[in-house]
Amino acid sequence: MIEVHDLHRHFGGFRAVDGASLQIEPKTITGLIGPNGAGKTTLFNVIAGVLPPTSGRVTMAGEDITGLPPHELFHKGLLRTFQIAHEFSSMTCRENLMMVPGAQSGETLWNTWFGRKRIANEERALRAKADEVLDFLTVTHLADQRAGQISGGQKKLLELGRTMMVDAKIVFLDEVGAGVNRTLLNTIGDAIIRLNKERNYTFVVIEHDMDFIGKISDHVICMAEGKVLAEGSLAEIKSNEHVIEAYLGTGLKNKDQLEGTPA
Ligand SMILES: Nc1ncnc2c1ncn2[C@@H]1O[C@H](COP(=O)(O)OP(=O)(O)OP(=O)(O)O)[C@@H](O)[C@H]1O
Ligand SMILES: [Mg+2]
């Protein structure tokens, strides 16, 4: 589904991504791990069009998508989760879902003048869709709450919900579990697995929580120093000498992360 060929992203002389190559198979959940500073977020940003690469190539289903802007990738079904924008914090969770660009057919002048009824119908459909998404995520009770007032974990769920308002094919999630309590993390994990099984979503998930990675991933990729260090099952990765060395080399905190010791 996604192929990354010899990707580089340098910041001045610093090689944040330094010749990374990998493949993401369709309808899989890939866990992307690696010590702090490994280049995981930078890799996501380059794939998702947020940062241009220094060199290298990214293809999606064989098509070269290198350096395409996020909105074009969005239309191809490639989504990096959206932060809940600050300006939407006074809107309800349902309204935040209804606002996802591309979910509605757009307020053209023509629509405003001649399509009042159509707009009303469309809004009803959009509202129904948003409610269906909230139900899928088991957070129907949040529908009328302001997005600015829900917990960090609930915001992560809402981010996932926003990908469901459009036809996402592949979704990139960066530290979806950071600062999220265990119960909510399980809800997020279950939603990811169900979206994968029931709606054929492909996921690439950056996460430091190894239990979470172990629970949801079909395949794990470990990055270090801008490169792909190892690939395989989580068990294979955890026992890989180079991986252990990479985590150890960056200090005890990272080693604990690899072993899944709660922080
Ligand atoms: N805009 C930037 N300018 C300069 N250096 C950057 C920039 N963005 C990232 N870096 C550096 O690139 C390296 C990789 O950063 P990145 O955020 O991709 O790592 P990461 O694997 O996501 O780490 P973490 O697990 O801590 O989130 C880091 O050393 C970081 O300081
Ligand atoms: Mg990061």
Image (tube, helix red, strand yellow):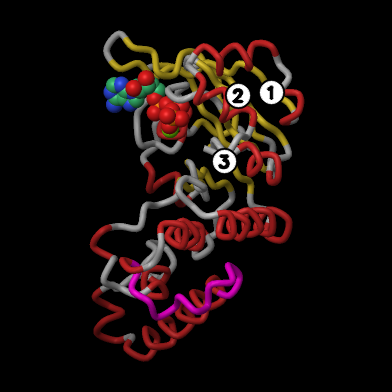
Q: Nearer the viewer, residue 47 or 210?
A: 210
The residue singled out by tag 2 in the image is 222
Mark closer to the chain start, 1 or 2: 2
The residue singled out by tag 3 in the image is 205
Residue 51 versus residue 20 in the image, above or below? below
Which residues are the magenta region? 135-147
Residue 102 percent location from the top left of the image? 41, 62
* Residue at the spot 59% in from the left edge and 59% down from the top edge: 183
Q: Is mark 2 within 8 Å of ligand 1?
A: no
Residue 111 percent location from the top left of the image? 31, 79
Q: Is mark 1 within 8 Å of ligand 1?
A: no
Q: Are marks 3 and 2 in contact (CB under 8 Å)?
A: no
The residue singled out by tag 1 in the image is 231
Mark closer to the chain start, 3 or 2: 3
Residue 57 percent location from the top left of the image? 49, 23
Tag 1 secondary structure: strand
Can residue 42 be seen by looking at this rendering?
no
Give amino acid for label 2. Cys
Q: Quadrant of ligand 2?
A: top left
